[in-house]
Image (tube, helix red, strand yellow):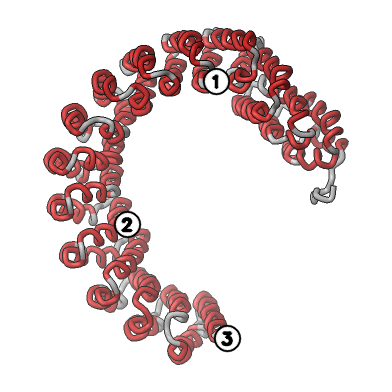
């Protein structure tokens, strides 16, 4: 009892709270069930608490959801696995409610409890529960039962296994589409527990029914079953039974079914093996890439690299590349965007020559796309192409487009370019970088958008790390010296931010001789925002410069700022002074 640190609520209080009109009180009470159970002890929990919960007919879904979740972890509180079956009745009731998320959580909790139960208890208590739910008058019970078969089946005696397979077959032909949907969703899990002999007969006939269902919402869930069953069947059975279904589904009259096929096709290729993939699935995939529904083309375009990887480069060039060219000029911007996010991955698959000849023109057209997301997706994956074609070719063909994008009117595109610059710099080398991109990096410090200026300051710091302090002295510091006197105070603030980032990279000597005088000078600025940023920067410089410099240069400046007429300037200056004193004391 000493373990329970919360106040122990007697069951009477719990009962009162669970009947209270205030939903929050009822919820809190449910969430404290474990505490109450520990206080009551295992026996009273079994005999009083669980029966009370079984009879609790709360009509609020939030309370029921919380109860379903709590009961899933309740096995230790009722006396362990031996008594786990006492938790089944309240969860069985919850499996029949109308709210889907409550039923789903109840099924999840039942599966968790069933996985811990002994075989004998499963046969005595769990399997009858599954059968009761499957025979339920109201469809909600039958929907819930589908998710429990994979737990019940392995422990069932032979005769009961036959019965369970028959019941599942009936659920797959239920009058209610919701029940058939649930049966289709859970078929893969159930099939994984069924013996190989029955898999080919019973399960495949059930699967066959689902694939011909008149509801597209059932058929699209059967597509997922294709991948799950494909992994369980031997290769020849998979080719005989699953492959024709996939090919038919790829031409289904419902675009939602075709969409599911486009999403799952890669996994299905792994199941059927290389030869049928080449002869049957490549044509099916090409059809999906040229589908008349944009959603299907989006799903198919997103898998173009994965699909190309399982084909030889020749096949990819022959079948997939023509579709990629068409998709790069697709009327839907979302299709182009999906293609742009994966097309770079095709470069290593196709090899250098095909990338230069076939893919580069596509990259360039996507880099100039009118839709910013398309351009963004291409920029963020440029390094994959660089590995294949080398930096010389990349810089000749793609760099002009990158420079153009650096001045793009959409700030998110400019931001993506900035974030890519350090990687590009490390690949291009210092000479090439100074030639083509150096000026751009300083230009971004004066962008109209704050996020760009902030990213540009970080970019300058990362470049200084990449190329070293000497390079920074030559290429960054002179321009920083110029920009600190910019008439616009926001740009002066950006330079102060850049200085605080650069100082740790450039070291004590350069900071003291070059950067510190700039900051001290900026403390005389007429704009209070600049002055309190000066105080912040000086605080960050204290650990970098020598103690004597901090005492002779930084401290007097902060003292002066701490007497400023502006309240914010005084606040940040006094904070910096306190930080300075702490550093002095610790040293």
Q: Earlier in the sequence, mark 2 or mark 3?
A: 2
Left or right of residue 314, residue 498 in this image: right
Percent x, y of residue 558? 48, 84
Q: Is residue 567 above or below residue 109?
A: below
Residue 310 in the figure: left or right of residue 140 = left
Res. 193 mark: 1
Image point 79% across, 24% down: which residue?
Answer: 55
Q: Position of residue 509 (x, y in %)?
A: 35, 84
- Distance from the alpha carbon under mark 2 to that under mark 1: 49 Å
Mark carried by residue 544: none
- SS for callout 2: helix
At label 2, counting other C-alpha atoms closer than 10 Å, the crowd grade (few under 14, some 14-19, many 20 or more) is some
Q: Does dot 3 land on a helix, a strand or a loop?
A: helix
Task: State which quadrant residue 51 falls in.
Answer: top right
Of the residues tagged 3 and 1, which is closer to the observer?
1
Drawn side of residue 359 relative to residue 333, left or right: left
In the rendered image, which residue does mark 3 sit on?
585
Dot 3 surroundings within 10 Å: few (below 14), some, or many (20 or more)? few
Q: Nearer the viewer, mark 2 or mark 3?
A: 3
Mark 2 touches mark 1? (CB < 8 Å): no
Q: Secondary structure at mark 1?
A: loop
* Cα distance in 3D space between marks 2 and 3: 40 Å
Crowdedness of circle 1 by 10 Å Cα count: few (<14), some, many (20+)? some
Q: Locate residue 212: give its quadrant.
A: top left
Q: Indicate which disc residue 419 carries.
A: 2
Coordinates of residue 576 in the picture (x, y in percent): 51, 79
């Amino acid at each position: 009892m000493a373990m329970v640190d919360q106040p122990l609520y007697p069951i009477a209080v719990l009962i009162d709270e669970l009947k209270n009109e205030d939903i929050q009180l009822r919820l809190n009470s449910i969430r404290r069930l474990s505490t109450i159970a520990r206080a009551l002890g295992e026996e009273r929990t079994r005999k009083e608490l669980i029966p009370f919960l079984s009879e609790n007919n709360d009509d609020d879904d939030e309370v029921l959801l919380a109860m379903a979740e709590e009961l899933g972890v309740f096995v230790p509180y009722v006396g362990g696995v031996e008594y786990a079956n006492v938790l089944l009745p309240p969860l069985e009731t919850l499996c029949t409610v109308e709210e889907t998320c409550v039923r789903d959580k109840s099924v999840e909790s039942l599966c968790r409890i069933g996985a811990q139960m002994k075989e004998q208890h499963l046969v005595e208590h769990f399997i009858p529960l599954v059968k009761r739910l499957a025979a339920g008058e109201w469809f909600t019970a039958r929907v819930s039962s589908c998710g429990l078969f994979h737990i019940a089946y392995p422990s069932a005696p032979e005769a009961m296994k036959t019965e369970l397979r028959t019941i599942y077959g009936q659920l797959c032909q239920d009058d209610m589409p919701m029940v058939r949907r649930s049966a289709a969703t859970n078929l893969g899990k159930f099939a994984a527990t069924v013996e190989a002999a029955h898999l080919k007969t019973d399960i495949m006939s059930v699967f066959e029914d689902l694939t011909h269902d008149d509801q597209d919402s059932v058929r699209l869930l059967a597509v997922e079953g294709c991948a799950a069953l494909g992994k369980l069947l031997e290769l020849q059975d998979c080719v005989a039974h699953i492959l024709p279904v996939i090919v038919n589904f790829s031409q289904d009259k419902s675009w939602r079914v075709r969409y599911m096929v486009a999403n799952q096709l890669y996994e299905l290729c792994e199941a059927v093996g290389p030869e049928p993939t080449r002869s049957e699935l490549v044509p099916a995939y090409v059809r999906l890439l040229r589908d008349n529904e944009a959603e299907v083309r989006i799903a198919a375009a997103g898998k173009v690299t994965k699909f190309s990887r399982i084909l030889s480069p020749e096949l990819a060039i022959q079948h997939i590349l023509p579709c990629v060219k068409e998709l790069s000029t697709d009327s839907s911007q979302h299709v182009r965007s999906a293609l742009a996010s994966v097309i770079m991955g095709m470069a290593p698959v196709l090899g250098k020559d095909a990338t230069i000849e076939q893919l580069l023109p596509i990259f360039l057209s996507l880099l100039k796309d009118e839709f910013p997301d398309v351009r963004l997706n291409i920029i963020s994956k440029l390094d994959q192409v660089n590995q294949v074609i080398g930096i010389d070719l990349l810089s000749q063909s793609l760099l002009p487009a990158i420079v153009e994008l650096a001045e793009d009117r959409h700030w998110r595109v400019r931001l993506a370019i900035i974030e890519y610059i350090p990687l590009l710099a490390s690949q291009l080398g210092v000479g090439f970088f100074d030639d083509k991109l150096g000026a751009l990096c300083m230009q971004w410090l004066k962008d109209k958008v704050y996020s760009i200026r902030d990213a540009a300051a970080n970019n300058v710091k990362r470049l200084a790390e990449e190329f070293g302090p000497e390079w920074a002295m030559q290429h960054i510091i002179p321009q920083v010296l110029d920009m600190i006197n910019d008439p616009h105070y926001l740009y002066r603030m950006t330079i102060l931010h850049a200085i605080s980032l650069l100082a740790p990279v450039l070291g004590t000597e350069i900071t003291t001789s070059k950067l510190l005088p700039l900051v001290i000078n900026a403390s005389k600025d007429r704009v209070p925002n600049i002055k309190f940023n000066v105080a912040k920067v000086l605080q960050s410089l204290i650990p970098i410069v020598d103690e004597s410099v901090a005492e002779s240069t930084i401290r007097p400046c902060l003292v002066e700022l701490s007497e400023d007429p502006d309240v914010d300037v005084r606040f940040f200056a006094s904070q910096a002074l306190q930080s300075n004193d702490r550093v002095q004391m610790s040293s």
